Amino acid sequence: MEFELLDIKNDYVFKRIFGEKDDILIHFLNSVLNYPENEKIISLTYLNTEINKDQEDDKE
């Protein structure tokens, strides 16, 4: 059985992986940023970054 990997640079894929469970994104960020133990990320606040369409044919 062969699996095709999804492209993490795709907005939908990224949001599904990192936007649904805080602990996944926190763990990823702490791994990448390599902060000292007393400066590790422990919680997140998500801001709405969606841009609504002004016209029917605008990109959302």
Image (tube, rainbow, N blue to C red):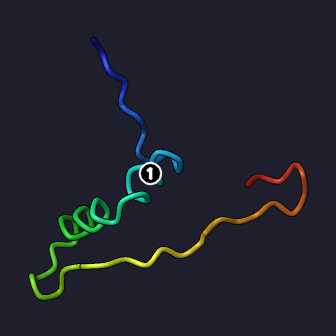
Above or below, 31 against 17 in this view is: below
Image point 76% across, 52% down: which residue? 59
- Looking at the rendered image, the quarter that the N terminus falls into is top left
Closer to the camera, 34 or 37?
A: 37
In the displayed structure, would residue 49 be above or below residue 53? below
Residue that numbered label 1 is attached to: 14
Q: Residue furthest bottom?
A: 38
User: Hey, which quadrant is residue 60 in on the image?
Assistant: bottom right
Query: Can you name the residue that lies furthest to the top here?
Result: 1
Whole-percent x and y of residue 14? 44, 51
Residue type indicated by callout 1: Phe
Q: Is 1 situated above or below 44? A: above
**Residue sitting at x 41%, y 45%:** 8
Front residue (pair 59, 41)? 41
**Callout 1 crowding tier (Cα within 10 Å): few <14, some 14–19, many ≥20:** some
Residue visible at 65% across and 65% down?
Answer: 50
10 or 50, which is in the foreground? 50
SS state under label 1: helix
Given the current orientation, which residue lies at the most extreme right position?
Answer: 55
Count numbered badges in the picture: 1
In the rendered view, does 28 fall on the left or right side of 15?
A: left
Q: Position of residue 18 (x, y in %)?
A: 38, 57
Q: Quadrant of residue 28?
A: bottom left
> Could you tell me residue 55's position as x and y percent?
90, 58
Query: Could you tell me residue 12's position as x and y percent?
Result: 53, 47
- Against 47, is 14 above or below? above
